[in-house]
Amino acid sequence: MKKTSKLKHLLNSPQNPDFIMEAHNGLSAKVVEEAGFKGIWASGLSISATMGVRDNNEASWTQVLDILEFMSDATTIPILLDGDTGYGNFNNARRLVKKLEQLDIAGVCIEDKIFPKTNSFINGEAQPLASIEEFCGKIKAMKDTQMDEDFIVVARVEALIAGWGLEEALKRAEAYRQAGADAILIHSKKSNFNEIEAFMKEWNGRHPVVIVPTKYYSTPKEEFRRLGVNLIIWANHNLRASLSAMQKITKQILIDESINHVEGSIASVEEIFRIQNAEELQEAEKKYLP
Ligand code: SPV
Ligand code: MG
């Protein structure tokens, strides 16, 4: 099955929501696939952080594409790109779709904010939203551009993040559905599920819904299923896991002036060779080198 069709299937599987997991480079993408996840969230926050910059479009969109190319080559499960605002207006967004299809990326999520964006958890109320008309034109341009009919465009509603309320969120979600989006991502920064629950009840299964429970992580999966959520994104946990691990080990090596105490608790060099598939090259060398 094509990666696009796999993602479409994940979004449209009723009754039981699936999970996709964040990755930010070729290695973390491989880790996500090996663990058994059915899809990858190419997080804007995580990719920018690993580049040492902020989640404010400081990395250019082609620099993001370079990372995505490695992620896509390294895996067989679908990748949903966090495409921020589409990196400009409708024209930039439709060119993005063209390039993503060339890289075998299964879909892209765009959010109804203004380029350059800011992460939703930084002063969300201060963030301007795009006009509904402008954002609908962007969705239409993206859907008109895709060559593969299964390529996915997810429209992310930031109205709750910006404090514009449930009515506005529903109005926007309905407009984006009618503009041709394949799914709605409704985002919330609340530490409980109430806001999303209210949205889901009013939405009433009109179209697939994606959520990102970074802040309301203690909500059990059963709640998401009960309310008809289709896809759940664990958005930044490989980035956070690796940052914690790197900080701890680096500090310990500095203090110890030795690697003696860390050797047993980190991945072996052999494990790195395995995940790189070094063995395949050794076999190929036997076959092709004189
Ligand atoms: C990301 O992972 O970059 C996201 C999700 O967009 S959030 O950080 O929650 O905005
Ligand atoms: Mg993001």
Image (cartoon, helix red, strand yellow):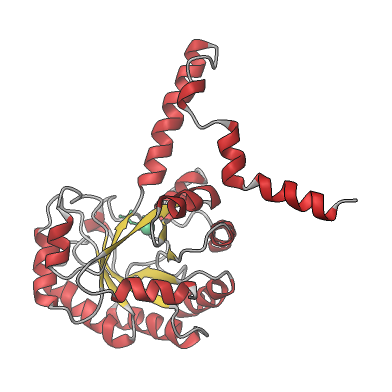
In depth, the one of 82 and 162 nearer the eye is: 82
Q: Position of residue 113 (x, y in %)?
A: 33, 67
In depth, the one of 78 and 82 nearer the eye is: 78
Res. 228 image quadrant = bottom left
Q: How many marks?
A: 0
Tell me: 72 left or right of 144: right
- Whether residue 79 is visible to the viewer of this picture, yes or no, is yes
Q: Is residue 262 above or below residue 9?
A: above
Q: Position of residue 287 (x, y in %)?
A: 81, 54
Q: Position of residue 83 (x, y in %)?
A: 43, 65
Res. 206 image quadrant = bottom left
- Whether residue 130 is visible to the viewer of this picture, yes or no, is no
Q: What residue do we see at 31% from left, 73% from top?
A: 11
Q: Is residue 78 above or below residue 205?
A: above
Q: Position of residue 257 (x, y in %)?
A: 54, 11
Tell me: 247 left or right of 176: right
Q: Quadrant of ligand 2?
A: bottom left
Tell me: 236 left or right of 74: left
In depth, the one of 263 and 52 nearer the eye is: 263
Q: Is residue 52 above or below residue 202?
A: above
Q: Is residue 2 above or below residue 50?
A: below
Tell me: 112 left or right of 268: left
Q: What residue do we see at 52% from left, 73% from top?
A: 96
Q: What residue do we see at 43% from left, 52% from top?
A: 32
